[in-house]
Image: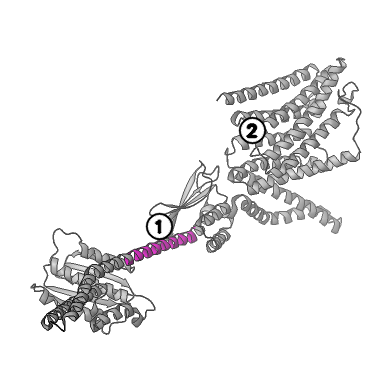
Amino acid sequence: MADLAGHRLRAAACTAAGAGLTGAAVVFAVLADVTWTQVVDSYTFTNLAIGLGFLLSGTTIRWFVPRNRIATLFIVSGLGALSTATASMMLWYGLPRDWPSPVLRALATVYIGAWQLGIGLCFAVALLLFPTDRLLSPRWRPVVWLTVFTGSYQLLSGVMSSAQVNGDPAAVSLLSVGWDVAGTVYNQVFGFAGLGLTLLTVVALVLRYRRGDELVKRQVQWLLLAFVIITVINSQRWITGSGPILFLLTFTLVPVAIGVAVVRHELFDIRFVLSRTLLYTATVTVVVVAFAGLVAALSAVVSDRLSPGVPTGAALAVAITFNPLRVRLQRLIDRAFYGGRSDPAGTARDVGEQLRQADELADVVDLARVALRLPWMVLVRLPDGAELARAGTHTSGADAAVPLTYRGEPVGTLRLGLRRGETTLHESDRHTLDLICTPLAIALHATALAEQVRQARTATIEAAATERVRLQRELHDGLGPVLTSIAFRADAAANVMRTDLDRADGLIGEVRTDLRAVIGDVRRIVYGLRPLELEDLGLVGALRQHIATIPAQTRRPLRVELAAPDPMPVLSPAVELAAYRIAVEGITNALRHSTGRACLVAVTVGADLEVTVTDDGDAPAHWRPGVGLRSIDTRAEELGGTARAAPGDAGWTVRARLPLSAGRDAAAGRDAAGRDAGAVRDG
């Protein structure tokens, strides 16, 4: 906290110093009776404005971002320009009044060198640090040192020259040694070096924009907006080499833009302002150039008699092409600043291509975010709300949510951050996102299906493991001891066969009894895996046999009928087993819980296999599904089907719909269980 207070105190002191220099320049200008034209022509007014711009931007940055080096460089630049303006007015006042030569020469030294120290050196280094307060990479350090060396050369060559301020021999720098670098080879070398460094600074800013995140891009766009305005206003000066000096006041926009970019880059939607500025600037420029070119070309080919109509014809030609030109330029500029929202189909195509190639949804989301130039984007799955992918850096600005649906069912939500200055999702963005959301919704649905398949595989593996444990327990605890006992009795019978036939005959009888029990146990185990009736009779025959045994199992007068297609199509073993179990459970449910006297089991085959068990009994007042009814749901869901078991207005109804397996082979489908069952029967 004390460190922050110290930085702010120094920033306030620098501001006070700048105010003092500005006040001194105004006072001496008044005392010297300098005219407004002289103030402007001597660059005093522009130096004051530019110096205040740099100083206030630097102190503002220092106030809010204390350790930012750009702030220090801007403060030095601002104080340098203000010192030059103040020294100029003091010389205007002191030269006619024969101030002491050391004072006049000291003022001349400040006048010549102060602005070069600030604008020529510190500002150039600050651009290399903007906007992150660090170099683009360590490889740019030589560029900084070369910038410092070139700026120092310009400073020294100025203060060590014999240049006279206001053309007065008394106003010569204290460090003057008569060094005249004009026309020298090394001065030309430094001139080309300065041009090269300027181009490298531009390259650094371009690289920062291309490689930076949304924050860096917005900060660089502030500086770009300032440069565009300066270029437009001073274009005539740069083309002809002369122009109104006051146009140089636009250079103040550079430090102001950098200050805003560092401290308050979210002030408003800089993209919108910059894009529209570039659009109208480019349009006006092209129109003016085209008009001038057409006038020159037509004037050269038409006769003098028709020359008065040349401007009119050129104006008509330009007017006809103006709107198509503006639309094309706007499309190009919007593409640069707002990404793919100006080309929804192309953006959707790119996202679809990425979906085919990318391994992660995060890559696809990041591509969509970059394409639309959005700060951040998050893909959320429904209904659990799990975050599947995130791209960009979450900001505190406004956000929006776009629902993702597949065949009318919500499968997820695409949450995204809006650009600075936007409070609602732009219509063009929404149109583009509508196209992007379609492949994303399909991808989410595919992801959900893949998760279901994974869970189903896990459940299958667990069920198989559980079944193996059960079979192991049945064989080890049930059949194992009995077979061991049979082996011992068989050995005992063999041992006493020659000496005690009655004893051997009794042991063999016990072996025979145990073997029959073992065969019964094996049949029970195999029947638990798959009823033997299904192998012998098929689904319809097995159901008829089960229905035929009902009178022997209960004394209830329940008439059970079966309705099924004849012939029955070949079913896969899994579907056949599930249908049999569900139908038997439905009949059992009617026997135990219904008061009806008639029960109908209907089997229909269409796109799916449907099993329905209904009876005419009264529904109980209170009921809840038991183990049997829950097993019906489980069996149907295992095959991807549906089932419902509940009392209705006319009695109990059990209805299950099972999908038919495609490309099944009946013989192969029944092979494994059939061989086991057949072996038991043959045994």
Instruction: Find residue 323 and report its horizontal and vertical position in percent.
Output: 66, 54
How many badges with numbers are in the image? 2
- Mark 2 is surrounded, within 10 Å at the Cα level, by few (under 14), some (14 to 19) or many (20 or more) other residues, namely some
Task: Assign a secondary structure to mark 1.
Answer: strand
Instruction: Find residue 612 and report its horizontal and vertical position in percent.
Output: 23, 72
Q: Is residue 502 left or right of residue 356?
A: left
Task: Assign a secondary structure to mark 2.
Answer: loop
Instruction: Find residue 558 and report its horizontal and vertical position in percent.
Output: 11, 74
Above or below, 424 relative to 433: above
Q: Is residue 630 left or right of residue 234?
A: left
- Mark 1 sits on what residue? 410
Observer able to see residue 564: no
**Quadrant assignment, res 124:** top right
* Mark 1 or 2, nearer chain start: 2
Please check the rendered image and state whether residue 463 is part of the magenta-colored stretch, yes or no.
Answer: yes
Above or below, 139 relative to 465: above
Please, what is the three-letter code of the amino acid marked with disc 2? Asn
Magenta segment range? 437-464
CA distance separating discs 1 and 2: 48 Å
Residue at 28%, 68% in the rendered image: 472
- Mark 1 is surrounded, within 10 Å at the Cα level, by few (under 14), some (14 to 19) or many (20 or more) other residues, namely some
- Mark 2 sits on what residue? 68
Residue at 84%, 40% in the rendered image: 190
Above or below, 346 relative to 201: below
Residue at 55%, 42% in the rendered image: 421
> In which quadrant of the rendered image does the N terminus lie?
top right
Residue at 22%, 76% in the rendered image: 487
> In which quadrant of the rendered image does the C terminus lie?
bottom left
Please, what is the three-letter code of the amino acid marked with disc 1? Pro
Task: Give the camera-side residue of 513 and 199.
Answer: 513
Please check the rendered image and state whether residue 230 is part of the magenta-colored stretch, yes or no.
Answer: no
